[in-house]
Image (cartoon, rainbow, N blue to C red):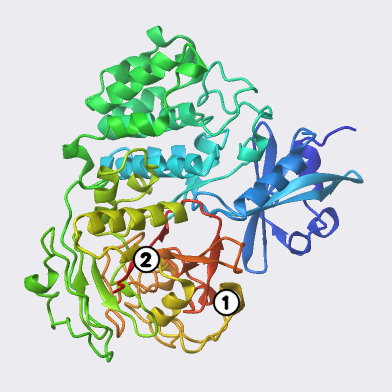
């Protein structure tokens, strides 16, 4: 069978009512160029069209060659991603009978349209904004860590497959070569853009570390441009950032690599040396995160990008207007130093009264009782500074939490932690406090149950019995801030489209009013892991509360539950509770 070429697709797509079977595409309108012809972006493997309809936009990828098992690969990818949410990926659907060309059906991929520009275009506009480029490099590091932490590799990381949205988020498109665990042992269907790939890459190189070389090339390029914007004019060709395939073939005579060797940023010099050293063999390519972590930007140039080693002070917050204040709250201040001090090692503190008493542990985490439960809740999600203490005492942790892809300090909620990470943190905290006799031998920290979380957010007496799935959306019209929709200004840290806050990503814990129990951030900032399975025994672990990326009314309800299979995400953290037992 003859496969369609770009002109065949161009002819067919001018009649969406005829060429498409998908109802949304069939009634959509194909974006056109100034001549009135379908606007297309063509590459080596696909032609991509923008289709609009019903208030939405899609990117329709029409393939320029046949791949025998493409349907199976996309089906496996769709199944794998159903339990993992990664901010960098977009929704898609593989349509086997996607487009009718010359009376034959051919597959397409229907993807969520991303409004943004290619990485090279964005970087070229920011050459004299080193802080922006360094922030982009930090976000890139977090993006790659999130992929690898979930056992994934993109397979074709390059300028055209990385889009930067108007609010600065990096999104990945084109999943034809993506690796996932269920494809282990198979060959990669394509080898990626040569300007970003190792010169010895072959189809047999196909695992979760496949992106290490291209990730390193992109990260090094962004860092290098931040230090020396003069690299752009002589070395950018429109099909790369700085480096090209010819640089990898003859590194000793490469002018671009020579300039990187002379970069004013010592880290760039080290990164460039690692690229050169790896060119002899794919086996010599270093793990991207290990190399990036060992070569941070110079402190004078990076500002506050990254994770501080010392804890910072949490800003003052206050209970919601009209809500009864917890007993420890004093207007205009946080709890007194006396109330906040941790007991000395070797002395078990008295059991808190089950009324309104505040209790503080050795990390400065503050806990208050929640009526209807036998637990005391941390007043805010676990912070970066809390998790840093755990990481410093624990070998072999996944390091995704250090690079979420945006700027954080110690007062922000830790993210990129999965359910097991959260549980292990609670176990570490329990073991340490028991060992130092700060808590009793039967007291423990853990994640809240789904039911306890409902009591904390104020709907525990309205849901009745059942699994989290059975309670999902059961109580309508109630949100963490009240019953008003859309949410009022200052309701929490939610998606910028709601215009209720000034944060693009996470915010310091306690930046918004507490509820009547003295609990902060039960709505927005980060989703929070709970102990339970979504449908009782399976279906992913429960997440509650919404995040800085949440905007839909249904998802912001106090009764909404998300169920995730344990992946690490840039908008998911956790909150601890402590249970005191006689």
Given residues 160 and 318, the one toward you in this image is 318
Q: What is the distance, in whole Å, between disc 2 and disc 1 at their CAs? A: 20 Å
Element marked by disc 2: loop
Residue 308 lies, with reference to residue 268, above or below; the image says below
Q: Quadrant of the C terminus?
A: bottom left
Give the percent coordinates (x, y) of residue 390: 28, 49
Q: Is residue 555 visible?
A: yes
Residue 285 lies, with reference to residue 125, above or below; the image says above
Q: Quadrant of the N terminus?
A: top right
Given residues 579 and 20, the one toward you in this image is 579
Residue 341 lies, with reference to residue 453, above or below; the image says above
Element marked by disc 1: loop
Residue 466 lies, with reference to residue 541, above or below; the image says below
Q: Quadrant of residue 505?
A: bottom left
- The residue indicated by pointer 2 is 525
- The residue mark sitting in front, 2 or 1, is 1
Task: Return the disc, 2 or 1, that comes first in the chain's sequence.
Answer: 1
Give the percent coordinates (x, y) of residue 37: 71, 49
- The residue indicated by pointer 1 is 472
């Amino acid at each position: 069978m003859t496969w369609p070429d770009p002109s065949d697709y161009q002819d067919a797509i001018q009649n969406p009512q005829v060429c498409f079977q998908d109802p949304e595409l069939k009634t959509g309108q194909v974006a056109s160029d100034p001549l009135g012809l379908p606007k297309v972006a063509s590459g080596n493997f696909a032609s991509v069209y923008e289709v609009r309809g019903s208030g939405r936009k899609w990117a329709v990828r029409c393939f320029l060659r046949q791949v025998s098992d493409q349907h199976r690969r996309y089906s496996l990818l769709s199944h794998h991603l159903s339990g993992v949410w990664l901010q960098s990926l977009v929704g898609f659907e593989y349509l086997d009978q996607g487009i009718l060309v010359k009376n034959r059906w051919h597959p397409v991929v229907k993807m969520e349209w991303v409004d943004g520009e290619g990485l090279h275009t964005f970087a070229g506009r920011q050459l004299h904004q080193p802080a922006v480029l360094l922030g982009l490099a930090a976000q890139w590091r977090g993006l790659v860590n999130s992929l690898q932490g979930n056992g994934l590799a993109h397979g074709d990381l390059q300028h055209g497959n990385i889009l930067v949205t108007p609010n600065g988020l990096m999104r990945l498109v084109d999943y034809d070569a993506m690796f996932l665990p269920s494809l282990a042992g198979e060959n990669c269907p394509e080898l990626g853009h040569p300007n970003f790939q190792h010169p010895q890459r072959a189809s047999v190189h196909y695992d979760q570390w496949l992106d290490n070389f291209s990730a390193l090339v992109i990260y090094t390029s962004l860092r290098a441009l931040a230090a020396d914007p003069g690299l752009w004019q002589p070395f950018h060709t429109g099909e790369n950032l700085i480096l090209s395939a010819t640089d990898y073939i003859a590194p000793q005579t490469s002018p671009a690599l020579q300039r990187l060797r002379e970069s004013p940023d010592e880290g760039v010099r080290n990164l460039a040396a690692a690229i050169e050293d790896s060119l002899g063999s794919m086996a010599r390519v270093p793990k991207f995160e290990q190399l990036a972590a060992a070569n941070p930007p110079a402190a004078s140039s990076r500002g506050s990008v990254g994770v501080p080693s010392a804890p910072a002070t949490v800003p003052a917050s206050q209970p919601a207007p009209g809500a009864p204040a917890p007993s420890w709250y004093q207007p205009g201040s946080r709890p007194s130093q006396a109330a906040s001090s941790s007991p000395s090692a070797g002395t078990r503190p008295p059991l808190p009264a089950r009324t309104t008493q505040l209790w503080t542990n050795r990390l400065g985490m503050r806990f208050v009782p929640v009526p209807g439960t036998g637990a005391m809740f941390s007043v805010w999600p676990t912070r970066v500074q809390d998790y840093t203490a755990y990481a410093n005492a624990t070998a072999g942790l996944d390091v995704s939490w250090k690079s979420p892809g945006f700027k954080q300090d110690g007062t922000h909620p830790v993210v990129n932690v999965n359910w097991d990470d959260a549980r292990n943190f609670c176990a570490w905290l329990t073991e340490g406090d028991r060992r130092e006799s700060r808590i009793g031998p039967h007291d423990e920290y853990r994640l809240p149950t789904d039911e306890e979380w409902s009591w904390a957010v104020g709907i525990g007496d309205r849901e009745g019995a059942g699994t989290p799935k059975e309670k999902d959306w059961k109580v309508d019209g109630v949100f963490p801030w009240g019953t008003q929709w859309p949410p009022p200004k200052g309701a929490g840290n939610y998606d910028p489209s709601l215009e209720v806050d000034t944060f693009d990503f996470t915010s310091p814990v306690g930046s918004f009013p507490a509820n009547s129990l003295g609990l902060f951030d039960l709505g927005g900032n980060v989703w929070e892991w709970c102990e339970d399975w979504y449908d009782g025994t399976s279906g992913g672990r429960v997440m509650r509360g919404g995040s800085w990326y949440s905007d839909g009314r249904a998802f912001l309800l106090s009764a909404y539950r998300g169920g995730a299979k344990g992946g690490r995400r840039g908008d998911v953290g956790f909150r601890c509770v402590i249970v005191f037992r006689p």
